[in-house]
Image (cartoon, rainbow, N blue to C red):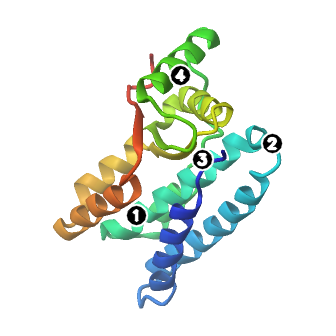
């Protein structure tokens, strides 16, 4: 089973409509950026049908970028062009592999997958910091092998800090509601560390 895109895409489209018609240019810019990210998500989701593992990192990156833009939109933080551009341009291509034996990473991923007790047809959440991309990707590969659906949510510590520091009270509530709606009803596999396992 491939990466589950639909919930992210649907939520992003809902937010997009409100942003592109907003009276403030910075929110319109975020809307345009989100629109571009939705188009990329649609493209990579169609590529997911031909061996899914072929485009896995690109698919995970598309979801990562859309989720970051959704967070920016719902948080009600003050948007300015540089902030939107910085987080819209954030990608996974610059993430370095962990400085450990790849077999250890695969073993850790297998252990975490098995601890979730996920079985064929389940949907699991794979989440963690982007520095742990290598582990997250290995868990995703196992999901593909085991026919387990999955969603991905990667944390950008820099974005998280800005959201927590700058979001309004209502924005923080929106972020919590957004997270809850994204994870409701699924088993959760979580990879959290500072990126130096």
Q: Position of residue 163 (x, y in %)?
A: 31, 56
Residue 91 marker: 3
Residue carrying label 2 = 51
Q: Alpha-carbon neighbours of circle 1 within 10 Å: few (<14), some, or many (≥20)?
A: many
Mark 4–mark 2 CB contact (< 8 Å): no
| Neighbour tally class for label 4: few under 14, some 14-19, many 20 plus, Cα within 10 Å | many
Question: Looking at the image, which residue is at 41% across and 91% down?
Answer: 23
Taking the view exactly as shown, the residue that stands out farthest to the front is 120
Tell me the SS state at disc 1.
Answer: helix
Label 3 neighbour load within 10 Å: few <14, some 14-19, many 20+ = some
Mark 2 against mark 1, which lies toward the viewer?
A: 2
Estimate the x, y position of residue 90 in percent, counting from the top left.
55, 50
How far is mark 2 from mark 1, CA to CA?
32 Å
* Secondary element at image label 3: loop
User: Which residue of the protein is positioned furthest toward the right in this rendering?
Assistant: 50
Q: Residue furthest left?
A: 169
Which tag, 1 or 4, sits closer to the chain's start?
1
Image-based side of 25 in relation to 147, left or right: left
Q: Is residue 92 left or right of residue 132?
A: right
Report, in whole angstroms, how far the alpha carbon at label 1 lies from the one at label 3: 15 Å
Q: What percent of the width, then of the height, locates residue 120?
A: 57, 38
- Which corner quadrant holds the C terminus? top left
78 in relation to 120, above or below: below
Instruction: Provide the residue designation for mark 1.
Output: 72
Q: Residues within 10 Å of mark 2 (few under 14, many from 20)?
A: few
Report which residue position mark 4 lands on. Answer: 109
């Amino acid at each position: 089973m491939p990466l589950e895109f639909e919930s992210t895409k649907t939520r992003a489209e809902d937010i997009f409509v409100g942003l592109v018609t907003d009276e403030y240019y910075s929110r319109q810019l975020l809307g345009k950026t989100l629109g571009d990210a939705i188009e990329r998500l649609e493209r990579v989701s169609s590529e997911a049908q031909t061996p899914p593992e072929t485009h896995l990192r690109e698919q995970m990156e598309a979801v990562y970028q859309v989720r970051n833009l959704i967070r920016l939109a719902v948080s009600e933080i003050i948007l300015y062009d540089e902030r939107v551009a910085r987080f819209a341009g954030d990608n996974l291509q610059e993430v370095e592999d962990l400085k450990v034996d790849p077999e250890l990473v695969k073993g850790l991923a297998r252990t975490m997958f098995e601890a979730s007790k996920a079985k064929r047809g389940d949907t699991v959440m794979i989440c963690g910091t982007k520095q742990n991309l290598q582990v997250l990707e290995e868990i995703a590969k196992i999901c593909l092998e085991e026919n387990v659906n999955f969603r991905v949510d990667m944390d950008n510590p820099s974005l998280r800090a800005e959201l927590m520091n700058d979001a309004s009270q209502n924005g923080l509530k929106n972020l919590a509601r957004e997270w809850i709606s994204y994870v409701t009803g699924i088993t959760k596999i979580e990879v959290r560390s500072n990126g130096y396992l």
